[in-house]
Image (tube, grey):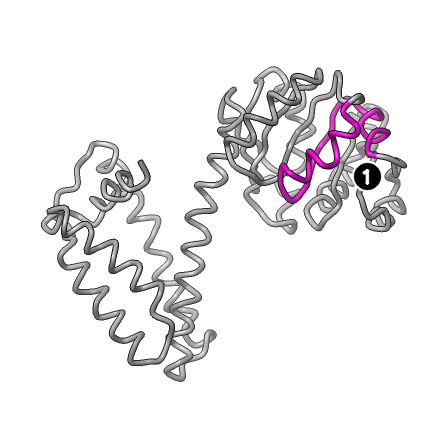
Amino acid sequence: MSKRFKQSLTVIGLGPMGQAMAAAFLDAGHPVTVWNRTASRAEPLVARGAVLAPTAEAALAANELVVLSLTDYRAMYEILRPAAGALAGRTVVNLSSDTPQQARAAADWMAGHGAVHLTGGVQVPPSGIGKPESATFYSGPEEAFLTHRATLEVLTGADYRGVDPGLAALYYQIQMDMFWTGLLGYLHAVALARANGISAGEFLPYATSTMSLMPGFLAFYAPRIDAGDHGGDVDRLAMGVASVEHVLHTVEASGVDRALPAAVLELFRRGMAAGRGADSVTSLIEVIGKAAA
């Protein structure tokens, strides 16, 4: 398909992610207008054919489809409030990170100015943009999503979660909950290894081996969790407490910060106090859920 048949669009926000997105659209032949508070960040994109809008209002006015790649929704309001008069008739795909509540509030605010808001949660770093195996969560009006799906799939695969504008943000934050805590667990393990003379490189195959077991565990536990089955036929929380205690003692003896394993042990002990000692470690979901409520 020639460039003249490709949808034109605007990208606002040219940090590393926004630059990667604008570049992917340009590579796919889409006419792209860009705007950023620091205009010099647009120079590499302008050299590749993008049009630099002089103001945020002009960037909005240039195209019906507008993609936002900003730090958070506060930055969105700082940029769009002064230019709100140009929002009418626009579909704003907000790929900025924030909470589900903020996404819902933003959708209402956009609607008040005559615009449609699609929430997005990009599941990859900038290096994953432009790769179909990557994915982004979307939620909001289905018609708007279907209208622009082909264009959005230039960036990544598109996983539509539903009409509630908060759903894409919710799925994204759930993923981030797992990612950051998992990565921190790895970093803590490497700190413990280094304290005992074992390099990250030497430990790598063992870390990889441990992580490779996780998909199997998740596939085994997910249906049992959904069924409310926390039976201790495979593992028991009481055994987990002893294991975490041993980890904590090793950490303390190695002079490594104890906060992370101590927090894990505290949660395990709360499960024990709730009478879950003979249940699976998955029973901690009930303990965590009650604390959250």
Query: x and y percent of residue 232 in the render?
Result: 12, 47
At horizontal 62% and vertical 48% (from top left) the residue drawn is 128
Q: Exactly how many numbered labels are in the figure?
A: 1
At horizontal 54% and vertical 43% (from top left) the residue drawn is 123
Query: x and y percent of residue 203 in the render?
Result: 41, 73
Q: Is residue 77 magenta?
A: yes
Give above or below for 2 relative to 38: above
Provide the major secondary structure of the magenta segment: helix
Quadrant that contains the C terminus:
top left
Q: Quadrant of residue 117?
A: top right
At horizontal 71% and vertical 41% (from top left) the residue drawn is 21
Query: x and y percent of residue 266 in the render?
Result: 25, 58
Q: Residues within 10 Å of mark 1 (few under 14, many from 20)?
A: many
**Foreground residue among 215 and 240:** 240
Query: x and y percent of residue 259 in the render?
Result: 35, 65
Residue at image mark 1: 35
**Foreground residue among 131 and 138:** 138
**Foreground residue among 204 and 88:** 88
Q: Is residue 264 magenta?
A: no
At horizontal 20% and vertical 51% (from top left) the residue drawn is 270
Give above or below for 39 relative to 160: below
Q: Quadrant of residue 190?
A: bottom left
Q: Quadrant of residue 104?
A: top right
Give above or below for 235 relative to 198: above
Left or right: 199 with respect to 124? left
Badge 1 marks a residue whose secondary structure is: strand
Left or right: 225 with respect to 157? left
Range of magenta residues: 56-84
Amino acid type of disc 1? Trp
Quadrant that contains the N terminus:
top right
